[in-house]
Image (cartoon, helix red, strand yellow):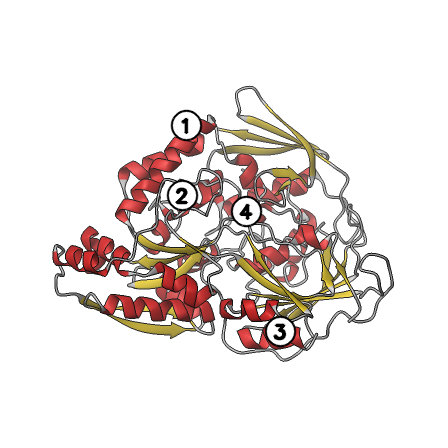
Amino acid sequence: MPDLPDTPTTSSRRARRARALALLLALAAGAIAAGCGGGGGSTGAGGGGAKADTLVIANAVNVDTLDPAANSVNESIWMTQNIYERLLQPNANGTDVVPQLAKSWDISDDGLTYTFHLGDHKFSDGTPVTAEDVRYSIERSIHYEGGWGFLLEAVKSVEAPDPKTVVITLSRPHAPLLADLAMYAYAVVPEKLLKAQGAKTFFQKPIGSGEWALTQWNKGSDLTFKVNPYWSGEKPNFSTLKIMIVPNDNSRVLLLQNKNADIIENPPGNLINELSANPDLQTYLFPSTRVDFIQLDQHFPPFKDPKVREALNYAIDRNAIVKLAYSGHATVGSSFMPYKMQYWNDSLKPYPYDPDKAKELLSQSSYPNGFKTFLIEVANDVAGNATAVVIKSDLAKIGIDVDIRTYELLTAYDKEDGGNSQMGQRYWTNDIIDPDEVTTFGVDPQGGANAFSSYWGDPTATKLVHQARGELDTTKRQQMYEQIQQIVYDQSPYLILDYSPYRYAAGKWVHGFHATPLGNYNLSLETLTVDQH
């Protein structure tokens, strides 16, 4: 493949973070007391009154980067999907892919050649999106150190035979190719401009072909966007989008209650019912691909013992976690794959809370008298903090002494990765509709994340991961993924806790906000309206 000038590199530790499926309920410490609500603006129909020209969203997590190849935080990922387009994108239900830059595509009979036909799209500086931009962007992400290239190992070549055609040739069948190409990492950037400016400069104020163009970025505080004047779709109902960075849960709630924010991310789970009762507000619990779990680093000797891991499963009261952390607005977990998504194994049942059985299993282990360990959690994460309290209490009942260690987000990431952790409170969400990503990431020890920093591996499960990736028969893929889930369930390299929804709250003056099961909300911003308030 050709040289890719100005392709950034990262350290191996950064690489693990960048592939962490945007882990943890990432609530960094501190608060930003700023922002203005959806004022100004024009009038219009729909909702029955004057329309605001600005939408303000208060997110919990700082923006790590605007480079789609390097994103490591969910909130950054979902936000940048408003800046850039990909060949394809997931639909609103997270069940299929639909056209974005590609208006159509053809697949050869042998399943090895995919030909994409581009529509008419322009970057926000007015230059047309070409097949060469697509080729460059895909290859750049494939080769990005610590990025997502391992998902497209079957790609033999990416070619742009003319300005409107992209041809991807595979070395072997690759079932999740379309889902992979709809991933945020394969967003398209203008090749000539990025090369001319260099990545460091370009991504301070990037150019994309998405609905929104960045106009201002106050690091650690807020970002402001205006509608891309060359956006190929229908013009949105407001012209300014502001993303505020407000790590403190209660501060975001106050911003909403005071009408200084229109939508807030992650209102505390224990406040959902209270916010719903406010006549001026509304709450959303969107179906998600989020799986909350406890990472067990097998460098810590007790967690190498299968009996210990099994005992932990029976020792934890998952129903208590759902009640305390989410006020009941979550589902107790079983499989490591997202709840009821593609190829989910519904035959697996959550481990019941049975402290007596946990004690019995521990007595059969190498640590019959228990042991001391630590659990890493993230500061200012109300749901995560509540979860840690339950786990500490439950494990104490079977003789395991848990020291809760609380860190700011990036410090927690560093301490949980790299093989120096013990117990880590984590989560993952899918970035694509296909299970290949999460199984490669969480099961294959060579798949880019050391089996989600557990350093666990099972030869049968790893073999199945690779077989399923190349299997085009959906019935056979289903059987393979069910077997993978069963192996992980039985061996428990991580303790699956629950499936929690994406939580948002908004003013009643907001109409039409929606997040997909993959977490992105760019589709809803195309049609959403905001009343004056």
Mark 2–mark 4 Cα distance, whole angstroms, equals 20 Å
Residues at badges 2 and 3 in contact (C-beta under 8 Å)?
A: no
User: In the rendered structure, which disc, 1 or 4, sits on the residue that comes first in sequence?
Assistant: 4
Mark 2–mark 1 Cα distance, whole angstroms, equals 16 Å
Q: Which residue is mark 3?
A: 221
Query: How many other residues sit within 10 Å of disc 1, few (<14), some (14-19) or many (≥20)?
Result: few
Say which of marks 1 and 4 sits in front: 1
Tell me the amino acid under the disc marked 1. Lys
Q: Position of residue 337 (x, y in %)?
A: 42, 46
User: In the rendered structure, which disc, 2 or 3, sits on the residue that comes first in sequence?
Assistant: 3
User: In the rendered structure, which disc, 1 or 3, sits on the residue that comes first in sequence?
Assistant: 3
Residues at badges 1 and 3 in contact (C-beta under 8 Å)?
A: no
* Residue at x 51% of width, y 56% of height: 501
Tell me the amino acid under the disc marked 3. Ser
Along the line of sight, the residue nearer the viewer: 440 or 381: 381
Tell me the amino acid under the disc marked 2. Thr
Residue 235 visible to an observer of this rendering: yes
Mark 4–mark 3 Cα distance, whole angstroms, equals 28 Å
Q: Which residue is mark 2?
A: 439
* Residue at x 37% of width, y 64% of height: 320
Q: Secondary structure at mark 2?
A: helix
